[in-house]
Amino acid sequence: METKKPFFDSNTTDILKGIALILMLIHHFFTYPSWWGEGVSYPLIAQAAPYICAPFRICVPVFCFLTGYVYYFAKEKTFIYSFKKIGSLLVSYWMVFFPVALIAVIFVPYRYNLRDFLTECIAFYCPTMPFCWYVNFYLTMMLLLPLLVRILTRSAFFDLAVTVLLIPFFASLAADPFVENEIVLQLRDNITEWMPVALSGYLCAARGLFFRAKDLESKILRNKAVRVLFFLLLALSAAAGRFVFPHLQITTHRLPVFFITADTLYAPLFVYAAVRLAGLLPVPFAHRALAVTGRYSLWMWFVSCVFYGITTPLFQPLLYLPKNPLLVLLWGYFLCFVPSLLLEKEKRLFFSRKMW
């Protein structure tokens, strides 16, 4: 049974983005001790970092899954639609990158050469915006989706083969011994790891898998408390699975080695669990806070780069000023959220003037 309506509405999508954004902040602030500058020390967190890094990074497959899921409901899955989405994202990216690059040149000081600067304009080289590698994957994804969706949803077996086998296999053909171009290798790695996750979102929407899961859930889990506990454990298990079993490696004698990412399973499980928890736990304030966070998640993601890129010496001491990890998280959220409000306002003014 296929469905033409989404399992969750736009507000719930924002809640999911808000959850993913907070996980991203924790992931960046605390799970890479090597990124901490002088005077930043959390011994217990540093010991736990190797074990919690991958689970908190589930934020990436969640965003990726949502992109594929939402894409299914686009009225026209064309290159024109893709170029509009790409253009909107790049404008947002440049609105943060250009000012930060200027700050880096004046105050660090840092010197760009023309090649590196132009490459970072499309996020294939990210010393200034280190977390924006996903931007170049998004560009690639939006150019591939109009082609891929033309061959999907023919049969469940075919969809599975394309998503978890054919895409990683063909991407792996650009193997290191034959291709030395860093951009090509980066594209290969991103497509191999993240394109199947985006397609899992698309196929979950196309085949109404979440609706089917809820029908099954209603037959098995009748008690609300049991449901809440089950979905909490499901979300935690999906995140922890990224550490325990991140991927399956396929090795043969004649064909290239390639990986099947387990995020094609973990992402939908985590998203479904989060959606059901949001529905089962009516906490209006938390829902509103997460939804607002989700609406500004793109800007907050971009702004957070200032703490770990070229401008680290300028901004990272400010981030860790409160010392206490919880206060650092709240303070870091504030430092990212306030500029995001201003950036969103400026972007709306920019488009309202019909300058684009």
Image (tube, rainbow, N blue to C red):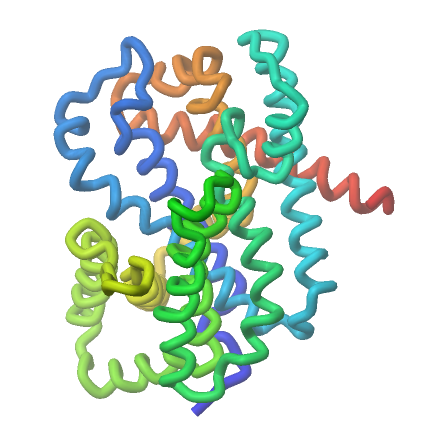
Could you tell whether 162 is left or right of 273 in the image? right
- Farthest residue, direction right: 354
User: For residue 228, what is the image quadrant?
Assistant: bottom left
Quadrant of the image containing the N terminus:
bottom left
At 52% from the left and 50% from the top, the residue drawn is: 137
Count of numbered marks: 0
Residue 318, position as x, y percentages in the image: 42, 15
Q: Position of residue 277 (x, y in %)?
A: 30, 63
Res. 163 image quadrant:
bottom left
Q: Position of residue 13 (x, y in %)?
A: 48, 60
> Which residue does the image show at 18% across and 56% down from the upper left?
245
* Residue 260 horizontal/vertical position (percent): 30, 62
Residue 20 left/right relative to 117 = left
| Residue at x 70% of width, y 65% of height | 79
- The residue located at (41%, 50%) in the rendering is 189
Question: Can residue 289 be seen at all in this image of the molecule?
Answer: yes
Left or right of 142? Residue 353 is right
- Image quadrant where one finds the C terminus: top right
Q: Is residue 16 visible?
A: no
**Compared to 100, does 133 lie above or below?**
below
Position above or below: 112 against 75: above
- The residue nearer to you, when weighing 189 against 282, is 189
Q: Eyeballing the image, is 78 above or below 188?
A: below
Foreground: 15 or 59? Answer: 59
Which residue is outermost to the bottom? Answer: 1
